[in-house]
Image (tube, grey):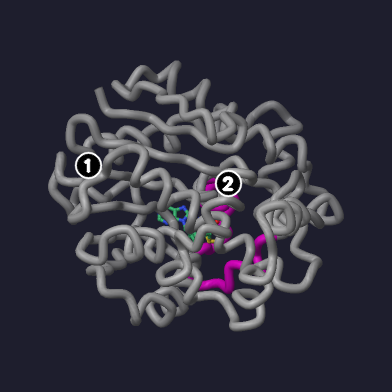
Amino acid sequence: MNLRTLAEQVQAGKFQSGLERHLSADVRARLRGMDVNGIESWFGQVIRNPIDLSGEGSRELLELYYTAAWHNLFETLHIPAEASLFEIGAGDTVYIPRALNAFSGSGAYVTANLNKQLTQNFLRKTADLSIQVRVIEEDGARILDYCDPGTFEVVSFHHAINDIVQTIIAGIEGIDTITNNWWAIEPQMLQAVMRYHEAGTLRRAAFEPFIQIVETCGHLLRQGGYMIFDNCTYAGYEQLGYSSEFHSNYINLVRAWIMEAGIGLEEVELPSFDRNWWMILRKA
Ligand SMILES: C[S@@+](CC[C@H](N)C(=O)[O-])C[C@H]1O[C@@H](n2cnc3c(N)ncnc32)[C@H](O)[C@@H]1O
């Protein structure tokens, strides 16, 4: 989201008693000592293309950026306080449950997550939240075996397009993404995705299973509910032979796939959210 708007909100103390409590005392104190220009400039050192996590406090700023952006989305889209939200492939990233917790405190959060170790970390990191949190250790493609259709206000794909595509390609290549350490096999997965991309076979391999997941998640949504995607590109991946240019185009790639598939989701544009990094779809 727009960094100026975010800096103004942080400076005004909008997230002080909620989202900022997950940050270290040092980062909180630094933020409190800055004016809007200083906060915007600090965010700008981290939130760029590619995302730069080399500076002190940068991981915490990235967390504040994403949790605040999702919190703002819930407000702007008038998501009800008792909303149910489904996230696919959360891994051990807790931005969305923390954002929902700060927004509502009485909502319900469900994720389908395949990797076992990341699920354990996720459960530990969300134990302090007051919203209901449920992890289903299953492929998101089968979520309707666990949850009723038409019962969720929001479905979130937070930086998950790549995770889903990697998992699809890993399945074809015989790489176990469930019991392995995800970070140990990540280079292998990224290089496999690159091989398919460069050979022009990525679409043939991934289009159908990916769209099946989106369509299934669409069934989870109530009418008028939102499916929200974000993506960003982290620095340092080119060294693994993974193209930042390819990764940066993920939202545009799946926007085209979803529109082509024609599954009853319409795009909503919000001025503060860049279409290259965010895609907000509404169930018609
Ligand atoms: C590295 S974590 C990423 C977490 C989060 N999306 C992020 O980028 O911050 C990737 C997780 O996505 C999960 N995943 C990928 N495809 C999935 C699918 N189809 N269903 C459920 N989980 C999936 C993996 O098992 C893994 O736990």
Asked whether, in this view, residue 113 is left or right of residue 192, the answer is left
Label placed on residue 162: 2
Q: Is residue 250 left or right of residue 228?
A: right
Pointer 2 residue Cβ closer than 8 Å to ligand 1: yes
Quadrant occupied by the N terminus: top right
- Report the front residue among 170 and 263: 263
**Marks 1/2: CA–CA distance:** 21 Å
Q: Secondary structure at mark 1?
A: helix
Percent coordinates x, y for residue 239 in the rendering: 86, 55
> Looking at the picture, which amino acid does disc 1 mark?
Leu
Q: Amino acid at mark 2?
A: Asn
Inspect the magenta stretch and tell me whether residue 151 lies in it: no
Q: In the depicted view, which residue is nearer to us: 215 or 81? A: 81
Q: Residue at x 51, y 26 (%)?
A: 255
**In this rendering, position of residue 112 left or right of residue 117:** left
x then y, percent, for residue 264: 29, 21
Question: For residue 154, what is the image quadrant?
Answer: top left
Assess whether residue 175 is covered by the magenta stretch. yes
Q: Is residue 259 above or below residue 195?
A: above
Tell me if the residue at label 1 has its CB under 8 Å from ligand 1: no
Instruction: Find the magenta span and give its range.
Output: 168-186
- The residue sitting at 50% across, 70% down in the picture is 20
> Which residue is at the front of the view, 95 or 68?
68
